[in-house]
């Protein structure tokens, strides 16, 4: 009995992350208010222009606008959750392994063509075409490494921005102090210069540690999950290509997900496959 094609993974908003994301900024503002400092003291247009404008300019020199826009889109996507399909995927792989082990790789050709997961479909197609075990592992490893590098690209952009922001904050502080030195003879003009100096540092350090680095961390976490998912499929594909016993394939997949089929389930599938082959 063929396993039905896997449904498309559904996206939904990660409401908990969205609600908790501003907690660091809120804590700082609360601490400021407890100390009697008004929120308006942290609103400095000149400091914002120096830090955020300068950081954007530096990032645009390092990366193309297209890459930056893609990084922003992927950053927003980290605040959605993707339905975990590892259990369905592992069941699908074990089902294919059962039929390939009993009847041969060619018997699952039609099922492989109907798969909706490109990495799994392409890998099994190579196995069915007679690709050797080492060559198959090399192809899958190259594909995995290239996809992981693409997934990491957006995180590197936010890492770069997190490196530039504090430095631009220091630059804003220096510019503010220069203004202070120019107006030593006019005490009434010193306040605005000092405000720009200190608020620039707050913007730079705060943006890096409360926004940019956490987003880079979320992007890396998502890339790691995707890489782990591809590694699970790689183990399944290679197990099917080697015609390993389905229990061995299931045990490999169990290292990646607790939803992998249990030995009793695999034994039941083998029994059904055996009855089917006798009836045929």
Image: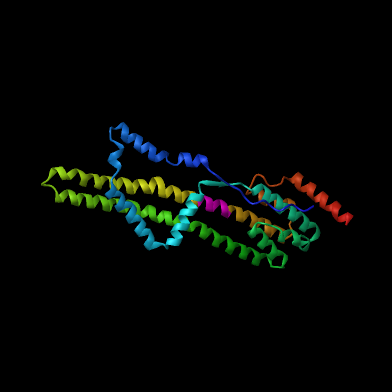
Magenta-drawn segment: 220-227
For residue 270, side relative to residue 237 (left or right): right
Scheme by which the image is coloured: rainbow
Left or right: 236 as drawn, with respect to 70:
right
Q: Which of 192 and 156 is in front in this view?
A: 192
Mostly what secondary structure, the magenta segment? helix
Q: Where is residue 47 in the image (x, y as percent from the top left)?
A: 28, 49
Residue in front for this viewpoint, 81 or 201: 81
- Percent from the top left, x then y, of residue 49? 30, 52
Let me know if residue 240 is in the magenta part.
no
Classify residue 236 by image quadrant: bottom right
The residue lying at 79 percent from left, 49 percent from top is 269
Q: Report the residue at 28% width, 51% height from top.
A: 170
Q: Is residue 248 visible?
A: no
Q: Residue at x 40, y 40 (%)?
A: 24
Expressed as whole percent of the image width and height from the top left, the position of residue 35 reads: 29, 32
Q: Tell me, yes or no, if residue 159 can be seen here.
A: yes
Q: In this view, does 214 lie above or below 142?
A: above
Residue at x 51%, y 49% (from the top left corner):
78
Residue 188 image position (x, y, % from top left): 15, 42
Specify the quadrant of the image occupied by residue 133.
bottom right
Side (left or right) of 197 relative to 209: left
Within the magenta stretch, is there residue 223?
A: yes
Q: Which of 271 and 210 is in front in this view?
A: 210
Q: Is residue 199 above or below residue 55?
A: above
**Name of the residue lying farthest toward the left:** 185
């Amino acid at each position: 009995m063929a396993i039905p094609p896997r449904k498309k993974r559904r996206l939904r908003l990660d409401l908990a992350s969205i609600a908790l994301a501003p907690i660091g900024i809120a804590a700082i503002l609360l601490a400021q208010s407890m100390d009697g400092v008004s929120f308006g003291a942290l609103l400095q247009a000149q400091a914002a222009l120096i830090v955020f404008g300068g950081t954007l300019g530096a990032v645009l020199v390092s990366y193309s606008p297209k890459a930056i826009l893609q990084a922003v889109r992927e950053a927003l996507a980290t605040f959605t959750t993707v339905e975990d399909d590892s259990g369905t995927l592992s069941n699908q792989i074990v089902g294919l392994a059962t039929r390939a082990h009993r009847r041969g790789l060619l018997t699952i050709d039609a099922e492989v063509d109907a798969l909706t997961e490109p990495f799994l479909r392409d890998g099994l197609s190579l196995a069915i075409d007679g690709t050797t075990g080492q060559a198959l592992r090399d192809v899958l490893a190259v594909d995995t490494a290239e996809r992981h590098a693409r997934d990491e690209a957006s995180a590197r952009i936010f890492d770069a921005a997190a490196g530039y922001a504090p430095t631009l904050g220091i630059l804003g502080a220096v510019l503010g102090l220069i203004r202070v030195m120019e107006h030593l003879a006019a005490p009434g003009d010193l306040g605005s210069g000092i405000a720009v100096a200190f608020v620039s540092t707050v913007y730079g350090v705060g943006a890096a540690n409360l926004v940019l680095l956490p987003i880079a961390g979320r992007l890396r976490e998502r890339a790691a999950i995707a890489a782990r998912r591809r590694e699970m499929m790689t183990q399944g594909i290679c197990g099917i290509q080697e015609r390993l016993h389905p229990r061995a394939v299931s045990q490999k997949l169990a290292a990646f997900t607790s939803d992998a089929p249990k030995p009793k389930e695999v034994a039941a599938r083998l029994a059904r496959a055996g009855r089917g082959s006798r009836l045929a």
